[in-house]
Image (cartoon, grey):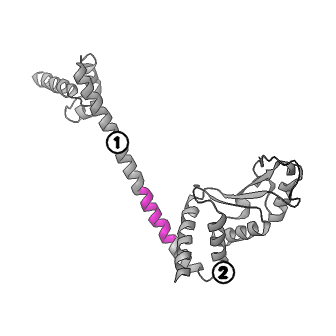
Amino acid sequence: MKALVQEKEKAIAMRKNGYSYNEILSVVPVAKSSLSLWLKDLPLTKDEKKVLKKRTDSNISHGRIKAASELRKRCLEREQEYLSEATTEFNKYCKNPLFHVGIALYWAEGAKRSNMFQFMNSDEKMNDLLLRWIETFTEYKRSDLGYRLYLHHPFIHDNWEVWWQKKLNVPEGAFKKTVIKPTQLGIKKRPNYKGCLRIEVPRSTKLLIKMKFWINMMVVLYEK
């Protein structure tokens, strides 16, 4: 009984010094329910409450820093893995002109700040070439991808979605809702304009990271 009283006094003293329940339990070997019972009506002075809050905030900050550090470490390890794969593939396809053309196209027109591999252009031949690049050098097929058309308002009744679908030989269900871009012009200034098509590769963070590596590798290659 005396030992239990001593443990309770130790727990109360630690609590008054701002220690959390988990920190106290690591020193005082009792059940959490017993500790809660000991401390539930513990009166704390204003200064003791400040100390408790300060330690709690400090522990939260430390935990967040540690979690962020672990996340950063995993990201770096993942990028090293992707870099290794990208280097192997670059060396494998380096003599294929289409490989370099696709990288250059993405460098010019592809999304760099997204977390997804996205390419957008109004030229049907350029879009088709990029799709052939994807099918040749990645595991994706054009039927796996997502497509979204951006049109100015005067063109919304021209059914360009169907035209793009047939031109690129992709299923109708792959097209997402068309985005209508506002314009002050009420006429078709460019009658043959068919909109801008955005090609989206789903779950493609890895491909996007590798593409950034390939762009740098291509630049280094042609600087030699």
The amino acid type of the residue labelled 2 equals Pro
Quarter holding the N terminus is top left
Q: At numbered mark 1, what does the secondary structure look like: helix, strand or loop?
A: helix
Q: At numbered mark 2, what does the secondary structure look like: helix, strand or loop?
A: helix
**Residues shaded magenta:** 74-85
Tell me residue 166's x, y (percent).
84, 62
- The residue at 67%/72% (across/down) is 136
Tell me residue 181's x, y (percent).
77, 48
Tell me residue 64's x, y (percent).
37, 43
Can residue 163 be seen here? yes
**In the picture, residue 125 is in which quadrant?**
bottom right
The residue at which mark 2 appears reads as 97
Q: CA distance from mark 2 to mark 1?
A: 50 Å
- The residue at 81%/46% (across/down) is 184
Q: Residue at the left extreme?
A: 2
Q: Earlier in the sequence, mark 2 or mark 1?
A: 1
Dot 2, crowdedness within 10 Å: few (<14), some or many (≥20)? few
Q: Is residue 152 above or below residue 108?
A: above
Lateral position of residue 183 relative to residue 69, left or right = right
Looking at the picture, tell me which residue is in the foreground, 205 or 198. Answer: 198
